[in-house]
Amino acid sequence: MSEIKAFEDKMQSAIEHLDKELAAVRAGRANPAVLDHIEVEYYGAATPLNQVASVAVTEARILTITPWDRSLLKAITKAIQTSDIGINPIDDGTAVRLAFPAPTEERRKQLAKDVSKLGEEAKVAVRNIRRDAMDKAKAMKKAGDLTEDGQKTMEENVQKLTDKYVKLVDKAIEEKQKEIMAV
């Protein structure tokens, strides 16, 4: 049943993708993951921010970015200002600070909706993998590689996997929504 393992790996990667997406959702707390997609101009090349500076959460709502080369302070500030994170960086001469404002009630509700949408996309991905696995079982039965009982067993195992990963998606969404709605 190595076929099932391949489908489980695909479902696991869908969960990992969801986790990355959720980490980038700004919930009012300082989270270094919001800077993952920011690149800084460094010696003529666009370099990921985490490769030219250390990023630390100094307080619940403050991120401190300390570049290894102080000449990068202006480039880091510019990269953050032109990004879509919507926070104005504060350059203090040695580090760049990002103060995350507490989101309004309306904004938290919108973020919770966005998180639900991400969860639905992950569930669709898991269900598509289930569909592919079911098609594979039917094809294997048709080709004579599986008996009818073997096909049923494979389909039952795939359904159990699907249920397990859908529950993991629900759990991740629920935790993120709790984090967002906490004031």
Image (cartoon, rainbow, N blue to C red):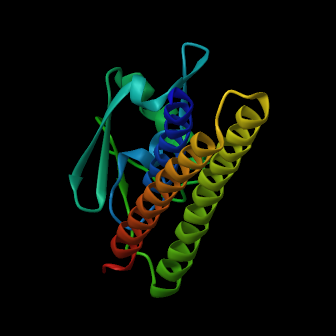
The answer to whether residue 34 is left or right of residue 98 is: right
Q: Position of residue 151 (x, y in %)?
A: 62, 43
Q: Residue at x 58, y 40 (%)?
A: 150
Identify whether 126 is placed above or below 1. below
Residue toward you, 118 or 160: 160
Q: Is residue 124 above or below residue 8?
A: below
Q: Residue at x 72, y 36 (%)?
A: 141
Asked whether residue 88 is in view, the answer is no
* Residue 28 percent coordinates (x, y): 38, 67
In the picture, measured across the screen, residue 177 lies left or right of residue 138, that is left
Residue 177 drawn above or below residue 99: below
Picture quadrant where residue 137 is located: top right
Q: Along the line of sight, which residue is nearer the eye, 144 or 132?
A: 144
Residue at left 46%, top 43%?
16
Q: Residue at x 65, y 33 (%)?
A: 146
What is the quadrant of residue 113 in the picture? Answer: bottom right
* Residue 130: % across, % down: 63, 49
- Residue 99 shows in this picture: yes
Residue 98: x, y in percent? 37, 53
